[in-house]
């Protein structure tokens, strides 16, 4: 009996020490995993080639895989994500501080406040005022060269307002060859005399530029007739021929501008399209865009000396002198039973608020769809207060009902367009992309809603060429493949938010950033081998508040990037931008530049696979984008 008692006592003591042993085991396990992660995160491996002709590549295995969706976000989305994270961090910090010294240790006050805020938002009881927008509208050439806008109460005084204007010369021989090749006229240089006497009268009108209280007033500036440049003799033809050599002519060469009705887009070269436009005598004269945009090039070099670059093109403050291009905006809302009540509420409130951000020079329409589509107006209408109010009332009446025909709700309006190929048309689609109707009949043609590739080929085929599609989705049940490539293949971009509560704010800000369009139908031409490595191949329009980003790859023997971009402004005049940057003189960025380049190429390959009908070529492109995803540590859900 005594021995049995001792065994029981030993067993009880062992049970008491069990948590301690488990804790020690957990600590040792965590240390072992940390050592393994550190080893693999700093060790360099050679990736095996996927096929015989693929060379070995040195790739650093990253412990952090990045989803493709994160790498392909536009700058505006990245900024909004950063702002949201910063806001959440600030709110979290405030909650911690409140819990330690404000008499609210459990954070109950903060929780109740957040619940009330969300309830007011969901019931559409609070609405922030429209964000004011102040910008320079520009001055026509028939007005004064420089005209201060003074208040009526300030008496004019005879004061010099500005120094005498100076003549700036641009020497033809100092321009790059690609710039000299442009078809422009030259003006002979003439001898000029610079007079330094400050007492000479100014050529500008006199008067104060500011009031006595220091309030600044807007001024207008018109340069009159701009000088024209060109290449003497037959020089330009040889240069253009030289630039066109080596253009990418394989299957992966750009998805081309959007096609005509009933045709899939041919895979042609960006270079050929640009050169054809530049040499067409029926097109308007070319005007330089250089002064109205800022160009920043950032590079990342690998161990072999080659590298990747990101070129960011963004309109600067001087672009305010360029007018907005008139366009049409359509908001399409899915209100079928597949859309939850909370999601439809967000769709409706966001759409109503977005109406206040429409450009007053544009036209708009609102469309709702379930198993069939219906529009608020029979045609596009002006974005005035009366039409906005009527559209808002139409949106408020929408209720969940019926089945979902996604192609039937979007396709007919894409095909109809707006009747003017020189007037851009933007379609913002609010849907989860999940159809409950399998087949849509468009005339005698069947379009399968459930087959993503067939759906996308049909959507591209009916696009007349001037329609951009911007899908907007929320939640985990969205058909990301369909929505991402519906935007990518139609000169748009899919915006997705994971949390439904962020939907309204992000949609309103997103649409507001697409109100001011300054250059449409952007195309580019790059000099040398780098032209085959630039993505995306098809450029979106250039908006005043959006950054256009291009990614490319260069070899170790490449020294300079020479890039030409062109498009059309509000007066349908051809605008071009030519810039060059030496890679060694560009600021250096991180490895994310290389990953972003690979992500853009993966998108391009996946889009080409959708449009391709050749099984062998599709298989080759699939192997290529899988290799890229493996080499660059990218998670691809497609």
Image (cartoon, helix red, strand yellow):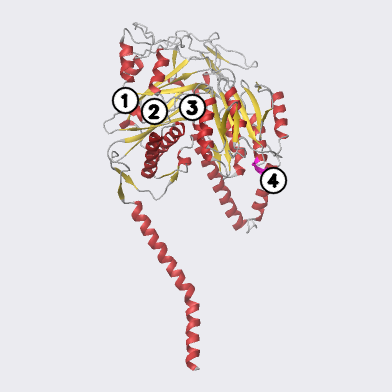
Instruction: Look at mark 1 in the image and give the residue it sits on.
Output: 528
What distance separates the C-alpha of mark 4 from that of mark 2? Answer: 50 Å
Residue 364 in percent (x, y) is at 63, 24
Residue count near mark 2 (Cα–Cα under 10 Å), binned few <14, some 14–19, many ≥20: many
Instruction: Look at mark 2 in the image and give the residue it sits on.
Output: 253
Which mark is first along the chain, 2 or 1? 2
Residue count near mark 1 (Cα–Cα under 10 Å), binned few <14, some 14–19, many ≥20: some
The image quadrant that residue 166 belongs to is: top left
Residue count near mark 4 (Cα–Cα under 10 Å), binned few <14, some 14–19, many ≥20: few
| Image disc number at residue 540 | 3
The residue closer to the viewer here, 583 or 370, is 370
Residue count near mark 3 (Cα–Cα under 10 Å), binned few <14, some 14–19, many ≥20: many
Which is closer to the viewer, label 4 or label 3?
A: 3
- Residue that appears at 64% across and 41% down: 339
Look at the numbered discs 4 and 1 and tell me whether their residues touch, using CB distance below 8 Å. Answer: no
Look at the numbered discs 4 and 3 and tell me whether their residues touch, using CB distance below 8 Å. Answer: no
Instruction: Look at mark 4 in the image and give the residue it sits on.
Output: 119
Q: Is residue 601 magenta?
A: no
Please provide the residue range marked out in magenta.
Answer: 338-343
What distance separates the C-alpha of mark 4 from that of mark 3? Answer: 38 Å
What distance separates the C-alpha of mark 3 from that of mark 1? Answer: 23 Å
- SS at mark 1? loop
Which mark is first along the chain, 1 or 3? 1
The image quadrant that residue 276 belongs to is: top left
Which mark is first along the chain, 3 or 2? 2
What distance separates the C-alpha of mark 1 from that of mark 2? Answer: 15 Å
Which is closer to the viewer, label 1 or label 2?
A: 2
């Amino acid at each position: 009996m005594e021995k049995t008692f001792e065994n029981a006592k030993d067993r009880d003591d062992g049970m008491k020490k069990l948590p301690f042993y488990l804790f020690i085991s957990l600590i040792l396990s965590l240390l072992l995993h940390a050592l393994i992660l550190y080893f693999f995160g700093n060790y360099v491996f050679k990736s095996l080639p996927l096929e015989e002709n693929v060379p070995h590549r040195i790739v650093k295995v990253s412990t952090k895989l990045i989803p493709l969706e994160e790498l392909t976000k536009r700058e505006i989305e990245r900024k909004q994500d950063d702002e949201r994270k910063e806001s959440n961090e600030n709110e979290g910090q405030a909650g911690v501080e409140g819990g330690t010294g404000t008499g609210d240790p459990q954070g109950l006050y903060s929780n109740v406040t957040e619940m009330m805020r969300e309830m007011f938002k969901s019931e559409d009881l609070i609405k922030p005022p429209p964000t004011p927008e102040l910008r320079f509208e520009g001055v026509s050439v028939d007005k004064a060269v420089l005209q201060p806008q003074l208040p009526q109460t300030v008496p004019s005084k005879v004061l010099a307002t500005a120094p005498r204007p100076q003549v700036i010369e641009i020497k033809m021989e100092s321009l790059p060859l690609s710039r000299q090749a442009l078809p422009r006229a030259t003006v002979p240089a003439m001898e000029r005399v610079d007079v330094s006497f400050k007492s000479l009268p100014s050529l500008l009108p006199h008067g104060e530029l500011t009031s006595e209280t220091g309030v600044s007033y807007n001024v207008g500036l018109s340069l009159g007739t701009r000088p024209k440049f060109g290449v003497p003799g037959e020089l330009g033809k040889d240069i253009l021929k030289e630039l066109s050599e080596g253009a990418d002519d394989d299957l992966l060469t750009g998805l081309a501008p959007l096609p005509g009705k009933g045709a899939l887009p041919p895979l042609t070269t960006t270079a050929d399209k640009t050169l054809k436009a530049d040499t067409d005598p029926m097109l308007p004269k070319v005007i330089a865009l250089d002064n109205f945009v800022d160009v920043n090039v950032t590079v990342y070099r690998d161990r072999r000396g080659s590298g990747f670059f990101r070129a960011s093109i963004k309109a600067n403050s001087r672009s305010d002198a360029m007018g907005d291009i008139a366009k049409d905006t359509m908001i399409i809302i899915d209100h079928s039973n597949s859309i939850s009540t909370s999601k439809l509420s967000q769709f409706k409130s966001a759409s109503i608020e977005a109406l206040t951000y429409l450009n007053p020079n544009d036209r708009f329409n609102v469309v709702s769809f379930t198993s069939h589509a219906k529009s608020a107006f029979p045609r596009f209408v002006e974005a005035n207060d009366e039409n906005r109010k009527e559209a808002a009332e139409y949106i408020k009446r929408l209720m969940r009902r019926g089945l979902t025909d996604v192609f039937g709700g979007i396709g007919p309006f894409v095909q109809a367009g707006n009747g003017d190929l020189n007037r851009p048309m933007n379609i913002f689609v609010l849907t989860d992309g999940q159809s409950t109707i399998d087949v849509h009949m468009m005339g005698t043609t069947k379009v399968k809603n459930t087959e993503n590739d067939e759906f996308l080929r049909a959507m591209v085929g009916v696009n007349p060429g001037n329609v951009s599609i911007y899908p907007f989705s929320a939640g985990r049940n969205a058909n990301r493949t369909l929505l991402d490539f519906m935007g990518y293949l139609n000169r748009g971009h899919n915006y997705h938010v994971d949390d439904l509560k962020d939907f309204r704010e992000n949609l309103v800000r997103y649409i507001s950033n697409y109100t001011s369009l300054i250059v449409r139908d952007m195309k580019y031409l790059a000099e040398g081998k780098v032209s085959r490595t630039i993505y995306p191949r098809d450029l979106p329009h250039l908006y005043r508040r959006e950054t256009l980003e291009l990614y490319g790859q260069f070899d170790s023997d490449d020294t300079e990037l020479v890039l030409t971009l062109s498009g059309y402004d509000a007066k349908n005049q051809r605008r071009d931008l030519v810039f060059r940057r030496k890679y060694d003189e560009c600021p250096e960025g991180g490895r994310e530049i290389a990953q972003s380049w690979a992500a853009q190429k993966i998108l391009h390959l996946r889009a080409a696979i959708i449009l391709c009908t050749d099984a062998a070529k599709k298989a080759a492109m699939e192997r290529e984008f899988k290799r890229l995803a493996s080499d660059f540590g990218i998670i691809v859900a497609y």
